[in-house]
């Protein structure tokens, strides 16, 4: 059954967007990996494109890895991606960081062309 990781609700098969928060649903409720909620978070990826950050977040959550996206607010306000402005950091529990890296690497290799379009080169960030 489709599942909303934000509202933590399951919905009927015909629904693809959460009626409560409007987010896209995961195909099924993930089986969350065990971890200590008190353990520190580790940055597994920094991207300068918010939609890409949430695409990667969804991929990790679908694999059962909890993710926090930390963003730099001034970059959002001014639309800048210079010296860390506009950075979106994907953070996971330290014990799951290596597994998250493997999942992201495989996901990025499968969709290399898409990532080239979504994530600009360092030279093009202004």
Image: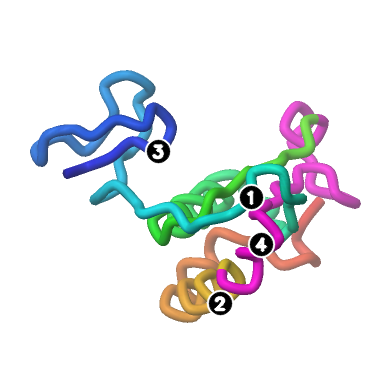
- The single residue placed furthest to the top in the displayed view is 20
Mark nearest the camera among 1 and 4 is 1
The residue tagged with tag 2: helix, strand or loop?
helix
Q: Position of residue 81 (x, y in %)?
A: 79, 47
The alpha-carbon separation of the residues under discs 3 and 4 comes to: 28 Å
Which of the 4 image quarters holds residue 68? top right
Is residue 116 positioned above or below 30 on the image?
A: below
Q: Position of residue 57 (x, y in %)?
A: 52, 51
Q: Which residue is mark 2?
A: 102
Q: Which residue is mark 1?
A: 36
Residues in magenta, as a range: 74-99
Residue 72 lies in the magenta stretch: no
Mark nearest the camera among 3 and 4 is 3
Q: Position of residue 6 (x, y in %)?
A: 43, 32
Q: Position of residue 45 (x, y in %)?
A: 68, 61
The alpha-carbon separation of the residues under discs 1 and 2 comes to: 21 Å
Q: Are marks 3 and 4 in contact (CB under 8 Å)?
A: no
The alpha-carbon separation of the residues under discs 1 and 4 comes to: 35 Å
Mark nearest the camera among 3 and 1 is 1
Q: Which mark is residue 5?
A: 3
Q: Are marks 2 and 3 in contact (CB under 8 Å)?
A: no
The alpha-carbon separation of the residues under discs 2 and 3 comes to: 22 Å
Q: Earlier in the sequence, mark 2 or mark 4?
A: 2
> Which sits in the foreground, 12 or 76?
12
For label 3, count other residues whose C-alpha is less than 10 Å away and answer few (under 14), some (14-19) or many (20+).
many
Q: Which residue is mark 4?
A: 120
Q: Earlier in the sequence, mark 1 or mark 2?
A: 1
Q: Which mark is residue 16?
A: none
Q: Earlier in the sequence, mark 3 or mark 4?
A: 3
């Amino acid at each position: 059954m489709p599942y909303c990781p934000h509202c933590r609700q399951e919905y009927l098969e015909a629904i693809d967007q959460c009626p409560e928060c409007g987010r896209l649903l995961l195909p099924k409720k993930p089986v969350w990996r065990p971890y200590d909620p008190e353990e520190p978070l580790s940055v597994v990826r920094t991207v300068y494109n918010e939609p890409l950050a949430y695409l990667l977040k969804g991929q990790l959550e679908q694999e059962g890895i909890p993710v926090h996206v930390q963003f730099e607010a001034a970059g959002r306000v001014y639309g800048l991606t210079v010296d860390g402005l506009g950075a979106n950091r994907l953070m996971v529990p330290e014990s799951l960081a290596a597994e998250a890296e493997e999942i992201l690497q495989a996901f990025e290799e499968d969709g290399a062309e898409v990532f080239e379009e979504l994530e600009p080169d360092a030279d093009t960030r202004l």
